[in-house]
Image (tube, rainbow, N blue to C red):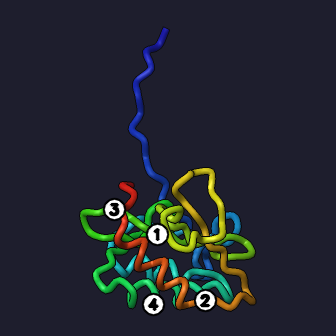
Amino acid sequence: MASKTPTKSRKKPLAKRSDGKPTLLSGGNPQIAKGYGDAPVQSYIAAMPGWKQDVGRRLDALITQAVPQVHKAVKWNSPLYGIEGEGWFLALHCYAKYVKVAFFRGALLTPIPPGPSKSQDTRYLDVYENDELDEAQFTAWVKQASQLPGERM
């Protein structure tokens, strides 16, 4: 009987399209390599399809204005926003028909964001193509969320 030797796990490189456009995963979520800082988040936003790109730019600008010291990263093909040493308080993710904003401690925000979650702490805000974003409310949620303990990921 031959002995089985464990093989090294190899990460597959990110798929690249021959036309130079970003690869989109199911639901239209951009496939962006994991990275820390503003650059990977801006790459993600630039790869968001259609109208979602404008939404991504606006959400990123509002978050950065509300929390100037915000730290950014892309993990699991989603931009994350947090406070250094405190964890992540918010994430974005593209779906086929909307952009989802996850507030990791959203149940503690006032008022509570409208989208429920399987997690008792997390709440969501879904932004659809023709939605008019309540920027004042969004900014208030971002400021509140940034002052709560974040998720360690």
Residue 71 point in image, percent of width and height: 32, 74
Sequence-wise first label, 2 or 3: 3
Amino acid type shown at disc 4: Ala
Query: Where does the C terminus fall, quadrant-wise?
Result: bottom left
Q: Mark 2 or mark 3: which is in front?
A: 2
Give the Cα separation between the discs numbered 2 and 4: 14 Å
CB-based contact (under 8 Å), mark 3 and mark 4:
no
Q: Which class describes the residues within 10 Å of circle 4: few (<14), some (14-19), or many (20+)? A: few
Q: Which mark is residue 134?
A: 2
- Reading the image, the residue beneath label 3 is 87
- Which of marks 4 and 2 precedes in the sequence? 4
Circle nearer the N terminus (3, 4) = 4
- 37 on left or right of 122: left
Q: Position of residue 54 (x, y in %)?
A: 59, 91
Q: Are marks 1 and 3 in contact (CB under 8 Å)?
A: no
Residue 42 in view here: yes
- What's the residue type where badge 1 is placed? Leu
**Quick one: label 1, few (<14), some, or many (20+) residues within 10 Å?**
many
Residue 93 position, x and y percent, is 58, 70
Which mark identifies residue 90? 1
The answer to which image quadrant residue 144 occupies is bottom left
- Locate residue 102 relative to residue 99 in the image: left or right: left
Question: Outermost residue toward the left?
Answer: 85
Which amino acid, by three-letter code, is at mark 2?
Answer: Asp
Which residue: 52% across, 73% down? 110
